[in-house]
Amino acid sequence: MHWEQLLSLRRQGDKGKRLRKEQDDTRLGFEVDYDRIIFSSAFRSLQDKTQVIPLSKTDFVHTRLTHSLEVSVVGRSLGRLVGKKIIEKYPYLAEIHGYHMNDFGAIVAAASLAHDIGNPPFGHSGEKAIGEYFKIGNGLRYKDQLTEKQWQDLVDFEGNANGFSVLTSSRPGNEGGLRISYATLGAFMKYPKESLPKKPTSNIADKKYGFFQNDKAFFSEVAAELGLIPNKSGPDIGFERHPLAYLVEAADDICYTIIDFEDGINLGLVSEDYALEYLIKLVKDSIDTAKYKTLQTKEDRISYLRALAIGSLINDAVNVFVENEELILQGKFPYALTDKSKYKAQMDDIIKLSVKNIYQSREVIEKEIKGYQIINTLLDKFITAYNNNLEGCATNYDKLLLKVLPERHQLERENLYDRLLHICHFVSLLTDGNALIYYRNILGHLD
């Protein structure tokens, strides 16, 4: 892979090339990507979507929106630090093409901002709830009417693939969705493959999938424009990662490891003594002991250690990337950057404690159970109504249900796979709160 190709400013529908040296630096294309994402309705909905604690009323707890903003800040730092090294190593990128180290930061920041934009309500349990509706629920009846890959898209419903669809799907009068630059889309594509074959190798790029069957053609177009390396044979589509996707992943890994842990501490799910023991291991080389001793509150102490820990992990991830940059360009680095971190053991310890005390806490489990019921009910009612309507056998109840769908989700889809995915997409874009409102209305609750 070649950096000048990987940094493509091309957008869906472009007839010619967009050259970096012809860009207006006051309105750079990669920064436009960031703006388009942050002003989108799908991004705004993240303010009421679960990060750790579903349906939490606690002010401190992070939502998907605050998490995404924090990941984008970390991603921007990672991108700029890596960009500085890349420009130094390949000066022609600046001298001939006009690229700047900040371009790398802008691309990674925009892709990081969007990294959770396709996630359904109620966290990762929301993805599982959608998948299990088809795998073991009423949606199982559609299996024989779909291709193997279409079915796999549904039973392993994936937020990353849904996010690609959110960013790129056209509808009448809105061709190309948000029309994000191909470089940013490439950095967003952590798992550049289709849903089958499932986990064919231990390569980190094969861990999940990155696009639905109805997005395959455009996904392949983006990959070809960027010069991504194909790594599948026959009819299967898959590629090695865009190098900057490693940085987006690292930004997410750093934030959820440290900041979810911080949430758990402030909620009392993790004791401060444990927190200090675990975080000190990450910051022992950078902590200012005298300053630390002046901090009087738990929140200030944890906040100070969190900032230092994130800084340590950012610098380490940059070092891992730069040391392996040539292997990454050759498609021969099948790991996450944090897998090769000198802090891997410490991060694993924090994650293990977070799983035990936070992710598997009673509050989280009880509210994920509610999320399963809510999503299952919404899918079943709306899919039944949508299909009945297009097959000419809609009941009055079906017609009433369809009237409460947002206008852009009332568009007709003739193909069964498209219809099923369309309703999954509608449900996935609901906030936790709106999903609960729809659920209560469907069940006839009067409160």
Image (cartoon, rainbow, N blue to C red):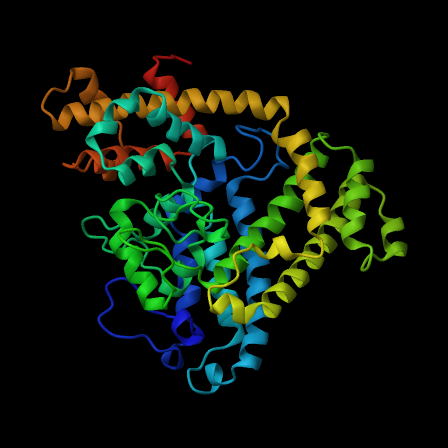
Residue at position x 44%, y 23% in the image: 372
Report which quarter residue 419 is drawn in: top left
Task: From the top left corner, tell me how far across and down residue 369 is, in percent.
Answer: 50, 21
Task: Say which quarter of the image contains residue 447.
Answer: top left
Residue 379 position within the rendered picture, expressed as x and y whole percent measured from the top left: 32, 25
Q: Please report the residue visible at 51 percent of the width from the left and 25 percent of the height from the top.
A: 368
Q: Is residue 100 left or right of residue 299?
A: left
* Residue 300 visible (yes or no): no
Farthest-out residue, bottom: 95
Coordinates of residue 101 in the picture (x, y in percent): 53, 74
Q: Quadrant of the N terminus?
A: bottom left
Marks counted in the figure total 0
Viewer-proximal residue among 113 and 195:
195
| Residue furthest left in the image | 392
Residue 360: x %, y % from top left: 62, 27
Q: Is residue 230 above or below residue 204?
A: below
Question: Compared with residue 280, is residue 242 higher up or lower down, i.e. above or below?
Answer: below
Please give the name of the residue rendered at 60% of the width and 44% of the height, measured from the top-left corner. 256
Q: Is residue 443 above or below residue 81?
A: above
Q: Quadrant of residue 52?
A: top right
Q: As rendered, which of 263 and 327 lies closer to the eye?
A: 327
Compare residues 117 and 138 and report the one nearer the observer. 138
Q: Is residue 4 visible?
A: yes
Residue 179 shown left or right of residue 314 in the figure:
left
